Amino acid sequence: MSLRIPLAKPEITDADREVVLAVLQTPHLSMGPKLTQFEDAMAAYLRCPFAVAANSGTSALHLAIRALDIPRGADIVLPSFTFSAVLNVLLQEGLRPVFAEIDPATFNVTPETVEALLCDRTAAIIVVHTFGRPAPVDRLSTLARRKNIALIEDACEALGAEINRQRVGTFGDAGILAFYPNKQIITGEGGMLVTSRRTIADRARRLRNQGRDPGLDWFQHVEVGYSYRLSEMNCALGASQLRRLEETIERRQTLAARYDRKIAEIGEALLPSLSAENGRISWFSYVVLMPEWMDGSGRDFIAKQLLQKGIQTGRYFAPLHRQPVIRNSVPAELVVTDSVAGRALALPFFNQMAEAEVEEVCTALAKALSDLRGRRM
Ligand SMILES: *Cc1c(COP(=O)(O)O)cnc(C)c1O
C-alpha cells in the first residue's frame, strides 16, 4: 500500500522558489544580505532584539550553551520526553542531564517538577515547548532568576506560540528555533538563536563562524569556534516562509480543531487540550494519547493498521532516559514520561492537509481502536 497521507509535508510556494533562485543569480551564497534579512525579520516577529541564524536547531542550542559559558560537569535540567538533539549537545559539552517529569495534559515540564531537581550543581534549565504548546516559561524564568541559573527555551517546535501575548523563545537568556522540513517554517536545514542580551548574540555570531570576530580582521581568530553558518539560499527561503507564518499558524489551528471534534466523537483516545493556559499554541504536530488500557504494543498495532491504509503516524518521543547512549549512566525514574511515551501517537499534520483527510484519518483510527478492543475481549 502506498503512502497516501504522510505524517508531515513541507509547503513550498512559487514565491519561495523565486527567492531561492534569485539568490543563485548573485555571487553571495553565504554571509550576505539574506542572512541579515532573515535574522532581522525573525527578531521583529518575536519582538526580540537579537537573532543569530545557524545551520540547524541543534547548532543553535550548542551556540547558546557555549555563549552562556556553562561550565563542564554542571547539571542541566530538561525533559526526557523530547528530541535527542538536546541530549546530544549536553553530552558533547560534558554536561550532566537531569530529567524533569512532564504534565501529561500538556506534554511539558512544570515549575514544580523542575524546581524539585534544582541543586547547587544546576547551571541551567532547558525548557522545551513540546509539539508547539507553550510551557510555563513565565513562571520558569522567575524561578531561574531567583536561583541565579540560566534558562534556555527550546522553541524549535513552537515558533509563534505565546504566553500573555509574548512569543516563546524570548522569556529566557536564549531561545532556540529550527527550520527542518517538518517545522512551522522551513529552510531545508536551519536554526536560530534569539536573545535579548547583546553579549550572548555577539558571542554566538563569533562561535558560528570559527571563533572569528566579525568586526575585526578576517584572520582575527579569538576562540575555538564552529562552522555553523546558514547559507543565503536557506535564509532567503526562511524569510519568505516567515512572511506567511501567521497564516500557517491559523491554518494549523483550523486543522487541529477539526481533529479535536472528530476525535472527541471516537471517545477513546485522549485529546491534548486545544487551548493553552494564558497563551496560544502554534501547532507543530497533532499528538493523541491512546487510552490507559492500551500498552505500547496496542499503540503499535494501531499505527500498523493505519499504515495499511496509507496513513503514516509517528511515535513521538522515545524518552531520552531510556536511550542506550545514557540509560546505564544516568538513572532516572519517570513514571509519567514512560506512560505518555508508550501511548503517544502523532497523526498526519501539515499545512495543505485537506479536512477530508483529517476525517479519513479519524475514521481509520476509530476502526483500529475498535478492532483492538475486539481482540482484547
Ligand atoms: C527540531 C528540534 C530541534 C532541532 O533540530 P535540528 O534538526 O537540529 O534542526 C531541537 N529540539 C527539538 C525539541 C526539536 O523538535
Image (tube, rainbow, N blue to C red):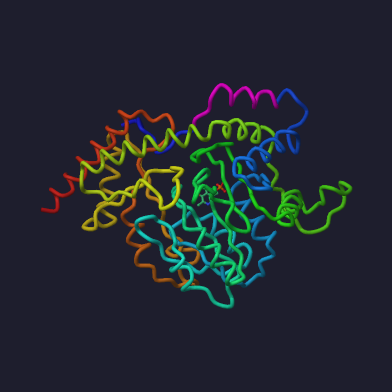
Residue at horizontal 24%, vertical 43%?
264
| 50 to the left or right of 267 | right
Magenta part mainly helix, strand or loop? helix
Furthest residue toward bottom: 120
Specify the quadrant of the image occupied by residue 260.
Answer: top left
x then y, percent, for residue 17 = 59, 24
Residue 166 placement (x, y as % from top left): 54, 49
Q: Which residues are magenta?
A: 11-23
Please say whether residue 13 is one of the residues in the magenta stretch. Answer: yes
**What residue lies at 36% left-to-right and 47% top-to-bottom?**
287
Name of the residue lying farthest toward the left: 377
Residue under the image location 51 percent in, 47 percent down:
165
Across and down, in percent, residue 240 comes to 60, 30
- 42 is higher (above) or lower (below) than 80: above
Q: Residue at x 64, y 56 (%)?
A: 62
Q: Check the image and report above or below for 367 versus 87.
A: above
Quarter of the image with the N terminus is: top left
Between 295 and 215, the one nearer to me in the picture? 215
Determine whether, in the image, residue 214 is placed left or right of residue 73: right
Is 68 colored magenta in this rendering?
Answer: no
Q: Position of residue 324 (x, y in %)?
A: 46, 63
How many marks do you count on the picture?
Answer: 0
